[in-house]
Image (cartoon, helix red, strand yellow):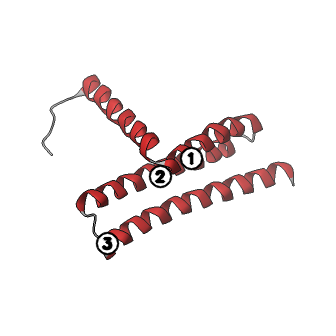
Amino acid sequence: MAYSGNKGLKRLILATGYSWQGFKAGWKHEEAFRQEVVLAIILIPLALFLNAGSVQTALMIGSVILVLIVEILNSAVEAVVDLVTTEKHELAGRAKDMGSTAVMLALINVAVVWAVILYALYFK
């Protein structure tokens, strides 16, 4: 890809626009992303409400945001694979499966982080 030549504030504004387009595409085309955004809308305020301490709150919120990041990257991998081939191919399947595994691991991370912090807050 050729260098665009955009610098400073113009580059930042354009990059923000591209990021917003990516968010909208994820919302429009990916049910899992929509579900995870709803989960984030619930869990992020809950993390703030629990008043668990700054580090714990950051870990709780960060684990939720990580799921969104991984889901968007997984969706990008799937889109590129689908662009390259519609045929069943071992490597295409592997790429999609590995992206799915990354999302699953991010979700497990949320469960572990939240469980450990909630346990420490309410059961110790």
**In the image, what residue occupies the spot 42% across and 38% down?**
23
Find residue 71 and name its label: 2
Q: Quadrant of the C terminus?
A: bottom right
Q: CA distance from mark 3 to mark 1?
A: 28 Å
x and y, in percent, of residue 21 in the image: 36, 35
Q: Secondary structure at mark 1?
A: helix
> In the rendered image of this protein, does residue 109 appear above or below residue 2?
below
Q: Nearer the viewer, mark 3 or mark 1?
A: 3
Q: Nearer the viewer, mark 2 or mark 3?
A: 3
**Residue beneath label 1, please?**
36
**Residue beneath label 3, please?**
88
Check the image and name the residue furthest to the left: 2
Q: CA distance from mark 2 to mark 3?
A: 22 Å
Q: Are marks 3 and 1 in contact (CB under 8 Å)?
A: no
Q: Are marks 1 and 2 in contact (CB under 8 Å)?
A: yes
**In the image, what residue occupies the spot 32% across and 35% down?**
18
Q: Residue 21, can we see it?
A: yes
**In the image, what residue occupies the spot 46% across and 48% down?**
30
